[in-house]
Image (cartoon, coloured by chain):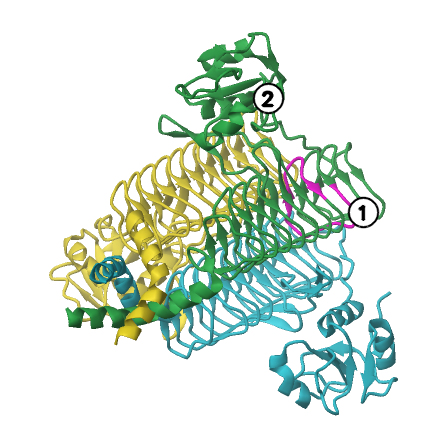
Chain colours: A cyan, B green, C yellow
Amino acid sequence: MSKTSFTAAELAERLGGDLRNCPGDRVLGQVLPLDQAGSGALSFLANPKYHARALQSGAGLILVDPGTDLGDRPQLVMKNAYWGFAQVLGWLHPEPEPEWSDAPVHPTAKLGRNCRVAPGATVGARTVVGDGARIHPGVHIAEDCVLGEDCVLFPGVVLYRGTILGNRVRIHANSVLGSDGFGYVPVQGVHRKIPQVGWVEVGDDVEIGATSTVDRGALGPTRIAAGTKIDNLCQVAHNVQIGEHCVIASMTGISGSTTLGHHVTLAGKVGTAGHIHIGSGSVLTGNTMVGKDVPDNSFMSGYLARPHKQWLECQAALNRLPALVKALKART
Amino acid sequence: MSKTSFTAAELAERLGGDLRNCPGDRVLGQVLPLDQAGSGALSFLANPKYHARALQSGAGLILVDPGTDLGDRPQLVMKNAYWGFAQVLGWLHPEPEPEWSDAPVHPTAKLGRNCRVAPGATVGARTVVGDGARIHPGVHIAEDCVLGEDCVLFPGVVLYRGTILGNRVRIHANSVLGSDGFGYVPVQGVHRKIPQVGWVEVGDDVEIGATSTVDRGALGPTRIAAGTKIDNLCQVAHNVQIGEHCVIASMTGISGSTTLGHHVTLAGKVGTAGHIHIGSGSVLTGNTMVGKDVPDNSFMSGYLARPHKQWLECQAALNRLPALVKALKART
Amino acid sequence: MSKTSFTAAELAERLGGDLRNCPGDRVLGQVLPLDQAGSGALSFLANPKYHARALQSGAGLILVDPGTDLGDRPQLVMKNAYWGFAQVLGWLHPEPEPEWSDAPVHPTAKLGRNCRVAPGATVGARTVVGDGARIHPGVHIAEDCVLGEDCVLFPGVVLYRGTILGNRVRIHANSVLGSDGFGYVPVQGVHRKIPQVGWVEVGDDVEIGATSTVDRGALGPTRIAAGTKIDNLCQVAHNVQIGEHCVIASMTGISGSTTLGHHVTLAGKVGTAGHIHIGSGSVLTGNTMVGKDVPDNSFMSGYLARPHKQWLECQAALNRLPALVKALKART
C-alpha cells in the first residue's frame, strides 16, 4: 500500500485535476513547504497569503485550487488542494506499525554507559539513549528516538517515534512529546486528518514539567532550543519554534507554527495565536492572550495583549467606567 | 452491604424524613433524572428551576426539601434532599472492587481479529475490543469497556470501567476517559461525594489529543459524537454532550451538562459554563469564556462572550478609554 | 560528592564572597527560610521585601548581595546570593539515585492489611501504604512515601519521593504529585535550577481529579488540607498551602507560595498570582485571575479580579462603551 514516490501523472489520476507545466513522468517523493521544496518535492498553496511564495517556489509540483494563477509553475489544479496535500502525505507516510518487543528494551535499541531503565519502562526499536540516562517506571519511548547524555525521564513520560532530545534534558511525569498535531482539513463537512509526519526536537538543558504536551510537526520539527524551561500543563503545538533560554510557566499554550525568540518569558496561563512571532527578551504577564507579532523586548499584558502600561491604564479606566456611564446619562 | 433495591419505607428510615403519597412497600431500584424516572425509580428535586419538571415526573419517589409543594407526587420530604440522593446512589452503586488479573488481558476480555496489545498494557474483565486495535504500552482499560474496530490508544491512555468507543477512535498518550465527574454536596461544611455512576460514550472517527480528560456522567453518559476532534489538555466534564464533527482546540474546558450542537468550533483555551447549549455551526474564538446559551451559527469572542464584531468594538473602545476618562475629567 | 554540612569558611571559599560576623568554623547543615533558620542553618536574602525579616533572623549564616546592610547578622556577602542559595541546596540535597527493584513492591516497602497493588504498579523503597489501599495498574509510587488508610490511586498516578497522603485520599488517573517546582535563578543569561528539596502533603478525604499536578515544595511542603476537592487538569505550584474543605474546579492554576484559607471555592479556569492569600470562605467565579490578596468571604470575578458586582457593572458599561465613544466624538 505504501509507496515512496509518485509520478505527477499518477497524482493527477489519484487526486483528479488538471496537470500544467509539468511532465507526467516527473517523480515526486517528498512533501515540503513551498520555500523548502525542490524539483523532487510536492508542495501546495492553500492560503492566499503565500501566493508570492508559490510563484517563487522551486517545487516539482504545486497543488492549487482552481482560479489561482500560478503562472509557469508546475501545478496540479484541483478542487481542495489542501485535502490533496493531506492525501499525498498519507500515501507517502502511512502511520507505521508499532514495533513492540517482549523485551522492555527493544533488541535494536542502544543504551549508553551507565544508563538505568526501570522495570516497566520500554525503549523502542532503533532508539539510541545516551550515557547516564535515568528512565523511570512507566516511561514509554517509541521507535527511532535519540536521547543525548544524562537525560532524566520521570514516570509515565511518553516519547512518540522520532523524538530527539539533547543532553541533560529533564522531563517530568506523564508529559508527552511527539503526539500528533491538531490538523484537519474539512471535506464536505467532515474533518479529514492531515497526517502529522514531523517530529520533536529538544535542545540541551531543557526541563519540561509534568503532564505537558509537545506535538510533533506536521512537516518538519517542533523545536525547543537549549536552556528553555517549561512548566506543568503547558501545550506546545505542531511546528512551534521556541528559542534558547525561554521560561514558560504553567498552563501556557502556544499555537501552531508560532515562533519565540530567545529569553522570552511567558508567565502562567498565557495563550498565543498561531503563526505569530514573539520577539526575544519579551515578557508576557500571567493570563495574557496575544494575537499578533510581538516586537523584541516587549512587556505586555491583557486579553488581547497590550503594552503593560497601557493595559494598567485600561484596567483603571474600566473600573471608573460604570460611574462615568451614569454621569453621562445624567447629563443628557 | 450492596443492595439492588430499597422499599420507600426503608429509604424513609435510612434517610430520615416524611413519606407522602407513596406506599411504604414500593420498590425502588434505580436513580434517574426527573424526566426519565419511572415508577420503579427514585428521583430528586434540588434545584427550584426544575420544580415544574418534578410536578410532571413519573418517578416512584421524589426526594424533596421541606417547604416545597410537590402536590400529589410520591415524595420523601427530608432535610437536604440532594444529599439524600447522593446517599441512595452510593447504596445502589457502590464502587466495584477492581478485577485485576495476572494476565495483561483479563481472561474474560475479548479481543477481535488482528488486535495488538503491547507488553505492559492491560485490558480489563469483560472488556470487548474490536478488530484491528492498537493498544500501546502502558494503556490501561478497565472492566466492561467496549471498543469498536481499528481503535488506536497511545501509551498511557486510561479508560475507566464502562467506557464505550466507536470505530476508528484514536486517543493520544496519557488521556483519561471515564474518571469521576466533579460532584459534591455540602453537608454541614463538608463536601460529600456524589457517586458518579454514569459512563463515557465516544462515536466513530473521534480523535482526542494527549493528556485530555473526559469525565464519566454522574447519571447516564458523557457523550462525544462521531467525527469530533479534541486537542491536547482539554476537559470534558460529566454529562457534557458534544455533537458531530466539532473541533475543540487545546486547553478548552466544557463544564458539566453543557451541550454542543454539530460542527461547533471552539478555539484554544475556550471555557464554558455548565448547563448551557452552544448551537450548531457556532465558532468561539480563542480564550472566549461563555456563560449562557449560544444560538446556532454564532461567532463569538471575549470574557464574557459577545458577538465577535461587538467584542472587537469593545476592545477598540477600551483602548481609547484612558484618554477619554482624562478628557472628561479635564472638562469638569 | 554529597556532604551533609559545611563550615562557613568552606562556603565562603566555594561560593566566593566576604564572611562577616561569623566564625569560619561554624557548621551549617540545613537551608531554611529566614524565619525558620536557627544557628545551624543557612538562609538568604534575595528579595528586598524580606530585609526586616533578615535583620531578625536567627540563621547561622545569611547569604546576601553586596550593598545590603544586615548589621550584626552573620553573613556571607556575595554576588548573586540567590544563586549561592541554589548551589548550597544542591550540595546538601543532591538528587538521590532512584532505588528501583525488580519486584513491583520494593522489598523495603510496607503494605498494610487488605491492600491491593495491581500488576504493573510499583511501590518504592521504604514507602509505607496504609490498610485498604487500591493501587491501580501503572501507578508509580517512589521512595519514602507515606499513604494513610483506604487510599485509591487510579491508573497512571505518579507520586514522587517523599509524598505524604492522609486517609481516604483518592487520586484520579495520570495525576502527578511531587514533581519539581518551577524554580530557576538567572546566572549570566542562563536559568540555573534551584533544587526542589521539599515535598507534598495531602490531608484526609482529599480527592484530586485526572491529570492534575501538585509540585513539591522548594523548601518544606506543598500542602493540601483535609476535605479539599480538586478537579481535573489543575496545577498546584510549589509551596502552595490550601486550607480545609476547599473546592477547586478544572483547569485552575495556583501559583507558587500562594495560600488559601478554608472553604474557598475556585471555579473553573481560575488563576492566581504567587505569594498571595485568598481568604476563607471566598468564591472566585470561572476564569477569574487574581493578582493580590483577597479578604475572607469575598465574591470576585474578572481579569483582574474585582468584587463580582463591580465586575458585572464593568461588563455592562463595557458593552455600552463603543456607542459612548461614538457619541462623545460626535459632540466634539
Q: Is residue B320 above or below residue B22?
A: below
Question: Residue at 73% of width from left, 62% of height from top?
Answer: A188
Q: Are marks 1 and 2 in contact (CB under 8 Å)?
A: no
Of B19 and B159, the residue lying toward us: B19
C68 within the magenta span: no
Of B132 and C140, the residue lying toward us: B132
Between the residue at mark 1 and the residue at mark 2, the CA separation in whole angstroms equals 46 Å
Q: Say whether disc 1 or disc 2 marks the residue closer to the N-terminus.
A: 2
The residue carrying mark 1 is: B115
Tag 2: amino acid: Gly
For mark 2, give the secondary structure: loop
- Total marks in image: 2
> Which image quarter is the N terminus of chain A in?
bottom right
The residue carrying mark 2 is: B58
Q: Main secondary structure of the magenta part?
A: loop
Q: Which range is magenta? A: B147-165
